[in-house]
Image: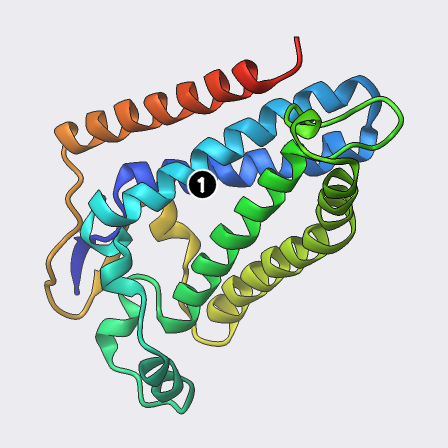
């Protein structure tokens, strides 16, 4: 067995920060009241994280790139029929790739609708005043009644898949996302995970986070 770096540090940090932020969003949303200030801040953080992951999917380490793990419908069908190849299990397998894309898409819808939502009591999204009342009502409904349920379902499905692989297939998907490395039968091209790439990722995220914060503050009502 050969130890190969699959998940670069920026991908791993993104993953665990997203987990923490989503948990914080759920808790603060349930508490309400003054906790909603943290709900909004965490939402801005999630938006920055998702935008970072989209860009990192083009410039990140090999196994984090969309071009490597996003498969065609035909490949997904063959994988479902049990005709997958060993290389499909190195990073995200075809089903895992769909899960990643789904979580990114649904997550973006959730944070974007939150920017335009209004609970008609104390809290409204920073961009709600830019659209009509009908659009605010639609965004609020999607954010609290529809997309939230879809997002929670996807997260639970993601967790269930991790448990299934651990119990049924004896594959630990969590450890590689912590250490970055996987034990493989043969050596494959590792993910680029140098000090320079990590510094680049940090700078990229800081620029994105600053842009999100500046944009929200600039467009929010005075």
Query: Please, is residue 145 above or below residue 125 in the view?
Result: below
Query: Please, is residue 96 above or below residue 211 in the view?
Result: below
Label 1 SS: helix
Query: Please, is residue 164 above or below residue 20 in the view?
Result: below
Position of 129 compared to 208: left or right?
right
Q: Which residue is mark 1?
A: 50
Q: Position of residue 217 (x, y in %)?
A: 55, 15
Position of 121 compared to 87: left or right?
right
Badge 1 density bin: few <14, some 14–19, many ≥20, Cα 10 Å: many
Q: Quadrant of the C terminus?
A: top right
Quadrant for residue 56, please give it: top left
Quadrant for residue 128, please give it: top right
> Which is nearer the eye, 198 or 147?
147
Residue at the far right in the pictured view: 121
Residue that appears at 66% across and 36% down:
114
Residue that appears at 25% across and 54% down:
65
- Disc count in the image? 1
Q: Position of residue 113 (x, y in %)?
A: 64, 41
Position of 161 compared to 36: left or right?
left
Q: Quadrant of the N terminus?
A: bottom left
Residue that appears at 32% across and 66% down:
70
Q: Position of residue 130 (x, y in %)?
A: 65, 28
Q: Position of residue 166 (x, y in %)?
A: 48, 66
Residue that appears at 41% across and 38% down:
51
Residue at the far top in the pictured view: 222
> Which is nearer the eye, 164 or 23?
23
Q: How is the image coloured?
A: rainbow
Residue at the far front in the pictured view: 132
């Amino acid at each position: 067995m050969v130890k190969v770096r699959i998940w670069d540090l920026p991908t791993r940090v993104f993953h665990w920060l997203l987990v923490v932020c989503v948990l914080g969003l759920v808790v603060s949303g349930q508490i309400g009241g003054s906790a909603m200030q943290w709900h909004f801040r965490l939402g801005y953080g999630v938006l920055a994280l998702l935008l970072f992951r989209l860009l990192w999917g083009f410039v990140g380490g090999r196994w984090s790139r969309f071009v490597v793990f996003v498969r065609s419908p035909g490949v997904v069908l063959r994988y479902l029929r049990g005709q997958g190849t060993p290389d499909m299990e190195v990073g995200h397998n075809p089903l895992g790739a769909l899960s990643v894309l789904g979580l990114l898409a649904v997550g973006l819808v959730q944070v974007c609708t939150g920017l335009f939502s209004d609970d008609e009591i104390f809290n409204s999204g920073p961009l709600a005043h830019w659209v009509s009342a009908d659009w605010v009502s639609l965004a609020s409904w999607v954010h609290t009644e529809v997309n939230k349920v879809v997002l929670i379902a996807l997260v639970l499905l993601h967790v269930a898949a991790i448990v299934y692989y651990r119990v049924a297939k004896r594959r630990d998907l969590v450890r590689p996302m912590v250490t970055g490395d996987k034990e493989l039968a043969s050596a494959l091209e590792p993910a680029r995970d140098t000090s320079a790439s990590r510094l680049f990722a940090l700078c990229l995220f800081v620029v994105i986070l600053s842009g999100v914060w500046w944009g929200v503050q600039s467009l929010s009502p005075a």
